Amino acid sequence: MPAKTKKKETLETWATDLLVEAHAIAPCPDHGYMRLRHSQHALDYARDLAEHRKFPGKKKKERVSAVEDVLDGLGDACPDCD
Ligand SMILES: [Zn+2]
């Protein structure tokens, strides 16, 4: 897993962290790439978190849409596995 460096949080990293916390996505243990987990419960929970958790300067709609954008950009498999 790549070393975590602390940098300024963007809406995208905020959304990614939120999805990990909700267990909607999880990193490949070998390579660290995020993968979809296909848990409807986790997705519902992530959307609920995005609606209620503040991000400076962003409205609820923008926060939920950032979460959807991260999900759209991910797949089921780690690109470095297989
Ligand atoms: Zn992998």
Image (tube, rainbow, N blue to C red):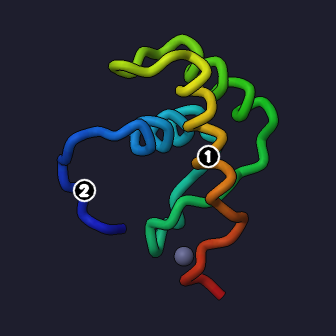
Measured from the top left, where is residue 9 in percent x and y?
29, 39
Q: Residue, x 36% and y 68% (percent of image)? A: 1
Farthest-out residue, bottom: 82
For mark 2, what is the residue?
4
Q: Residue, x 44% and y 66% (percent of image)? A: 32
Any atom of ligand 1 within 8 Å of the CB at mark 1? no
For mark 1, what is the residue?
69
Farthest-out residue, right: 40
Picture quarter with the C terminus = bottom right
Q: Is residue 70 above or below residue 65?
A: below
Q: Nearer the viewer, residue 2 or 75?
A: 75
Residue 26 shown left or right of residue 30 in the figure: right
Farthest-out residue, top: 52
Q: Amino acid at mark 1?
A: Asp
Q: Residues within 10 Å of mark 2 (few under 14, many from 20)?
A: few
Local secondary structure at mark 2: loop
Q: Is residue 26 above or below residue 14?
A: below
Q: Nearer the viewer, residue 6 or 81?
A: 6
Mark 2 or mark 1, which is nearer the start of the sequence? 2
Instruction: Please tell me how many numbered marks the rendered image carries.
Output: 2
What is the quadrant of residue 80 in the picture?
A: bottom right
Any atom of ligand 1 within 8 Å of the CB at mark 2? no
Q: Residues within 10 Å of mark 1 (few under 14, many from 20)?
A: some
Local secondary structure at mark 1: helix
Front of the two marks 1 and 2: 1
Q: Amino acid at mark 2?
A: Lys
Measured from the top left, where is residue 59 in percent x and y?
50, 16
Ligand 1 located in image quadrant: bottom right
Marks 1/2: CA–CA distance: 22 Å
Q: Residue, x 62% and y 58% (percent of image)? A: 73
